[in-house]
Image: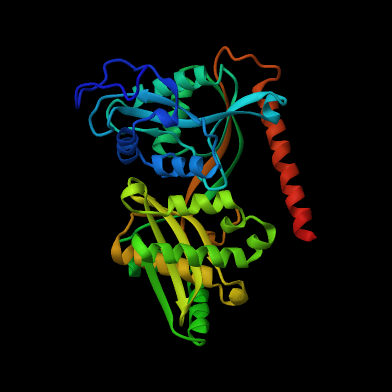
Amino acid sequence: MGLPLRRSPHVALDAAPEAAVVPVSALESGAWDALALAAVEPHPFYARRPVEAHRASGLAPADLAAVVVPGPMGVSGGLAALLPFVLRADIAGLGAAIAQPFLSPYVTASAPLVADGPDLDLRLDALVAGLARASGRRCWRWPLLAVESRPGAGLLAAMARAGWQIATVASFERPVLDRRASHLAFLADHPHKSRLKDLRRRRRRLAESGALAFETATEGPALEQALDAFLALEAAGWKGEAGTALASRPDSARFARALFRQDGAASGPPAVRADTLRLDDRVIAASLALVAGPTAYLLKTAYDESLRAHAPGLVLEDEIVRALHDTAFAERLDSATLPGSPLEGLFPERVRIAEILALPPGGGSLLPLERRADLARFEHRARAEVKRLIGRR
């Protein structure tokens, strides 16, 4: 089956199309980009450029495949839905292979890309049928799903219609910030005014040491320089010591440079953005973001740890909030964080992020799904304990 399937423009679907599993390398770039732009509540992580940056850097399998649903040519370019995925051994499968959306340390949302429109339920039904075939009716383990978003809730509803069993392993509330009419309105509505007061105090302390300047780059040499500053800051801090900074490994460094390029050879969604905070002539904090649709995802932040007492990273985030209201570069900031983020005190809204197990009908089960979920929860607790012990050392 060739993809994307060519149909007449703007023709509604009168029956659910059939999904297929194809190598992402076989997808037509224009169709993939069009779907990323037309998706309901799009996130950037399954758009073409981020996925290709993962593959080119070695952070994703060269033969990475996706479940895809063809659709009308229209605004989504012939693709109606897409989800990159892998099969891997997992404790929830008792060591046997299960299916999972493609993830990396730089993927913070895992909802499928699904074209918006009146046929959304048909597209989701077709996608869910494809997910069952792609996994060989094995269990799916699905972390980082925004379960109350339209694509997340729609996916779960489509699974329920198809008779899937679903169990929640864990969930948390991720901080987000919805743009107000003005920055003054944001300040007036904020539920933690003491936190804002503390940030103003820290900013004043920083300004006593020199001239503070907030800068934004979205393309060209300025973007490249901001990326270099970010990589250097992160590598100089605790992530560099732990070997988890982007610059610590050749593959993650290649990934960053491939993703944060905006030129003719690397065009297409998502938009990229780098914000920096300078103290005199040196960058003391830097933030990298991906902008998909109305939402900017704050992918990574680094700061000069010698200035930790003045929280330069949070001062920079506060400047980004001001820029959001002053320039309207997005309608929402997504912190893209795990639980315990410092942004919980700055971003007042929340979205629920869950990890689920989903078993299609007819899937062989050595254990009931809830027992599988117990194993996954045990794995979470064990990893948290290891992290705690390492932190104490």
Relative vertical location of residue 359 with respect to residue 275 in this rendering, above or below: above
Q: Count the numbered circles shown.
A: 0
Point out residue 303 in the picture as x, y percentages from the top left corner.
55, 69
Quadrant showing the N terminus: top left
**Residue at the limit of the structure toward the top, as seen here:** 362
Specify how the rendered protein is coloured: rainbow
- From the viewer's side, name the closer residue of 64 and 384: 64
Q: In this view, does 349 lie above or below 51?
A: below
When the figure is inspected, residue 349 is found, relative to residue 124, above or below; the finding is below
Left or right: residue 42 versus residue 282 is left
**Quadrant holding the C terminus:** bottom right
35 relative position to 128: left or right: left
Please report the residue visible at 46 percent of the width from the left and 59 percent of the height from the top. Answer: 288
Relative side of 275 to 11, left or right:
right
Visible in this render: residue 286?
yes
Please tell me which residue is depicted at 48% across the width and 32% down the height of the picture: 84
Q: Can residue 182 be seen in this view?
A: no
Q: Position of residue 368 (x, y in %)?
A: 68, 20
Residue 309 on image: x %, y %? 61, 76
Residue 210 position in % (x across, y down): 48, 86
Q: Which of 192 and 361 is in front in this view?
A: 361
- In terms of depth relative to the viewer, which is nearer, 113 or 232? 232
Q: Residue at x 64, y 61 (%)?
A: 240
Residue 220, quarter of the rendered image? bottom left
State which quadrant residue 332 falls in: bottom left
Q: Residue at x 45, y 20 (%)?
A: 130
Pick whichever, 388 or 347, lies toward us: 388
Is residue 61 placed above or below 137 in the rendered structure?
A: below
Figure quadrant of residue 100:
top right
